[in-house]
Image: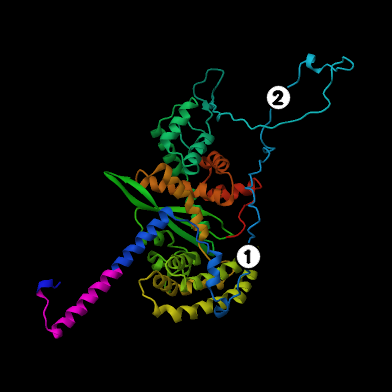
Amino acid sequence: MVEPTSIPDDPALLKPLVRELFAELRKSQRREESLQAKVDELARKLFGRKTEKLDPNQLALIDFEALGLEAPTPAEPEKDETPAKPRRRAKRKRPSKELPRRRVEHPLPDEERICPCCDEVMPAIREEIHEQIDYKPASFEVIENVTFVYGCRKGCDEKIVSSTKPPQMVEKGLPGPGFLAHVVVSKYCDHIPLHRMEGILRRQGVEIPKTTLCGWIKECSERVEGLLGALKKELFRSAVVATDDTTVPVQKKGGAYSGRLWVYIGDLDHPLVLYDYSPTREGEAPRTFLETYGGYLQADAYSGYDQLFKPDRTPRIQEVGCWMHARRYFYEASLKDKGLPLEALAMIRELFRFEKAATDFSPDQRLALRREKAVPVLDTMKTWMEKHRHTVLPKSPLGKALTYVTNQWDALCRYTEDGRLDIDNGRSERMLRLIAVGRKNWLFAGNDAGGRRAAGMYSLVGTCRYHGWDPFAYLVWLFERLPSRPEDRLLELSPLAWAAENGLTSNLISQ
């Protein structure tokens, strides 16, 4: 850097110095803009609104006709004199008829039921019932498993036989199937840490140390390993598997590090949800888990998946992109620029509008609609990107959005090749909320083994939640049967088998 006292007077020598100073200034400005963009993004995530919906007023800035899109119908403006609608109060629902009921009568004393005309005691002519929901703490019971020893009445000592109790999830342990199911659901569904659970149980008169509860979960996780292996084979029969990952803090001496929990979701014919744990986010984790899978894989653009999509891989996996991720890039760009990013968002909005219209369609009907409606919009968007890609700075928010979508274009368009595929990977992100909410409560896993145990338990609980079933009822049923079930019949204990046995239907509308 030239010092002010050493600036030459010769114009010929000044020109290269000026050019150097301008280059340094541009570099500094770009760095400042990049840092300011990061600060703005962090501030928006902390304090701004979370929704990514387009402001209806912004749609007026878009030339829909030039893009070949149908302009949305403008909403009618509200009149100034129209009074504000009162806020609707939540309507109270009646208690479920399946709840047990206790009748409590409140009659008047005889002296207060005297008729003033005839001095007779008035009988009740109708009842008015006012319902309340009351609560009783969960109840515990001690099961006495009694076995018998049989011997000959004549005093023979050679023949003595005894009965045995059925195999248990925790051999020689205290917990019955219901107690174990309660502990697992409380931790992995209701996100109650074990030290809090210890206090809750103590208030109910049951003294169980946290270390014992942890040991029970370890026993359960080891018992269900065979079942999880069977569920994994069943999941891999899916034509489409969706995946994503999230962080899970893992405790270590002096602090914590970020492990990862990966979710894998099957298709409508194999609607299972499995989780896997890895200490890092290296691509080796999904490659190992999906080693024997072949079919479609819907994921984000994480480079760790790239090895899975090589054409020479056996079995072949085809990548399916996520338009929700692509849209997010353009939305971030629209916060800085109200021009081109809004045009991209308008086209992506059309793609999702077609998907919403096809919610109840069969795969063949959905595919026909996509080819008729979505493919022309995709062609328009590709032409639009080729036109503008080289006119914006590559490292600007819009440049990053265009680069992402261009690199992912084939994967993003793949959903128009098969009606079973989704336009986005939203179902994976929704199933990761189970982890995101949990880690705000239990804060971290104790070690890598704890992370793997969590993945196994989350797989059973998560599949039930995915369908809207009660995970407690399933786990009680499972823990009663699993210890005595042979290895070759473990699939009979899947959440899907339990639901079929109990006549339950899934709450899934669309994947």
Q: Amino acid at mark 2?
A: Val
**Which mark is drawn over residue 104?**
2
Q: On the rendered structure, is 308 left or right of 114?
A: left
Q: Is residue 12 visible?
A: yes
**Residue 491: percent from the left, percent from the top?**
54, 51
Quadrant of residue 415 within the rendered picture:
bottom right
Count the labels in the image. 2
Residue 507, placed above or below residue 63: above
Residue 232, numbered circle: none
The residue lying at 30 percent from left, 70 percent from top is 30
What residue sits right under mark 1 in the picture? 75
Magenta residues?
A: 6-30
* Label 1 SS: loop
Q: Position of residue 219 (x, y in %)?
A: 43, 40
Label located before the other in sequence (1 or 2): 1
Report if residue 12 lies within the magenta region.
Answer: yes
Callout 1 amino acid: Ala
Does the magenta portion include 371?
Answer: no
Q: Residue furthest right?
A: 118
Please say whether residue 422 is visible from this viewpoint.
no
